[in-house]
Image: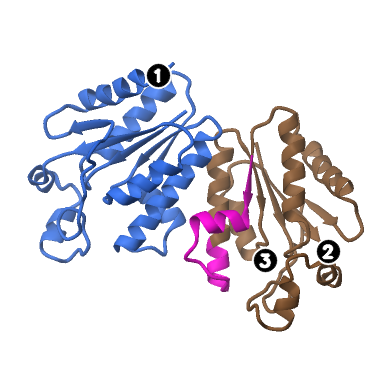
Chain colours: A brown, B blue
């Protein structure tokens, strides 16, 4: 059992890759739960905003949920911006099963170009505050287990890189 | 799969019965997770106090965790004061598997007598505010699936009543 933790900027492709990884793992009969940062925030943390403190708290909650699931043999896939190295490190430290961090990387110019929800545009014009990568920091992982570039690689290539990282760690046996 | 939800005043025996039910169910090879209100509050909700709003939020979080577990075939046993009928009803309504509510009842005079942590004494002398049953309300369940009286029944009798309620609902097959 393990936690697959996808971190990266908004729109980089975390949720998409989480869904693809879920399908691939569930297809081979594994029990998998995707914990989407936005969704869990809505359910557990409607009181939280986007200050550093609130973001860290949301990430800690996701980490706790992951331990609760992996303890019972369920693979936890977390897709959350999780911008701070310190909170990702904290979350890694409480896991009792392997933690595989995936940096879902994409150049911000490309994210501004995609911007399906118009969030970068709103952030750039300051109508959206505390937006990661624009008006709030994103600390890229220094040593992620996997680093994918969604601006250069196809979805399938990114998924393959993730599955390969699981395979070499003996997590797909 | 199901959620077993133990509600009642502080010191009534919720955590003890949760542990006993956990042992009984796990002994027959079932996957079980106890969610203790105090413990989950510490992990997920260090920011919450004991106002009505904060208590309801903590209870909603417990309900969400229960759905996350039961969805994967894990029995969720929740032990939490959960004093408000409205939040217990809300939590019941979001479950996708059966919800068995256990009213862990005990006369407050007996709770004051036991008081192992001195909480009732502190609440009575007003050094502890918002204490359920003393300075904050407890709304007894009108129609719980199980009603045990820890001031009259032994632990074993209470556990038997709980297991019997699960059995008649076909949840122990």
Instruction: State which mark lies toward you, 1 or 3.
Output: 1
What chain is tagged by disc 3? A
Name the residue that disc number 3 marks: A83
Q: Please, is residue A130 above or below residue B40 in the view?
A: below
Residue farthest bottom in this picture: A125
SS for callout 3 = loop
Name the residue that disc number 1 marks: B170
**Residue B98 inside the magenta-drawn segment:** no
Q: In the figure, is residue A100 to the left or right of A163? A: left
Crowdedness near tag 2: few (<14), some (14–19) or many (≥20) residues, C-alpha within 10 Å: many
Looking at the image, is mark 3 or mark 2 earlier in the sequence?
Answer: 3
Q: Which residue appears at 51% of the width and 54% of the height? A: A43
Real-space Cα distance between discs 1 and 3?
A: 46 Å
Residue A1 in the image: state x and y as whole percent. Answer: 65, 36
SS for callout 1 = loop
Find out whether the residues at labels 1 and 3 contact each other: C-beta distance under 8 Å.
no
User: Front-most of B123 and A14?
Assistant: A14
């Amino acid at each position: 059992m393990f936690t697959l933790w996808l971190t990266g900027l908004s729109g980089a492709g975390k949720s998409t890759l989480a869904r693809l990884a879920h399908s691939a793992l569930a297809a081979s009969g594994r029990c998998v739960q995707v914990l989407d940062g936005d969704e869990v925030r809505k359910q557990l943390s409607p009181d939280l905003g986007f200050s550093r403190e609130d973001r860290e708290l949301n990430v800690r909650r996701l980490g706790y949920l992951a331990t609760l699931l992996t303890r019972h043999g369920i693979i936890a896939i977390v897709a959350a911006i999780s911008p701070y190295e310190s909170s990702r490190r904290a979350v890694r430290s409480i896991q009792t099963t392997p933690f595989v961090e995936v940096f879902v990387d994409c150049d911000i110019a490309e994210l501004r170009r995609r911007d399906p929800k118009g969030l970068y545009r709103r952030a750039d014009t300051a109508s959206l505050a505390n937006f990661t990568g624009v008006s709030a920091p994103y600390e890229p992982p220094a040593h992620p287990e996997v680093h994918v570039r969604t601006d250069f690689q196809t979805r399938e290539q990114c998924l393959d890189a993730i599955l390969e990282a699981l395979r070499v760690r003996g997590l797909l046996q």
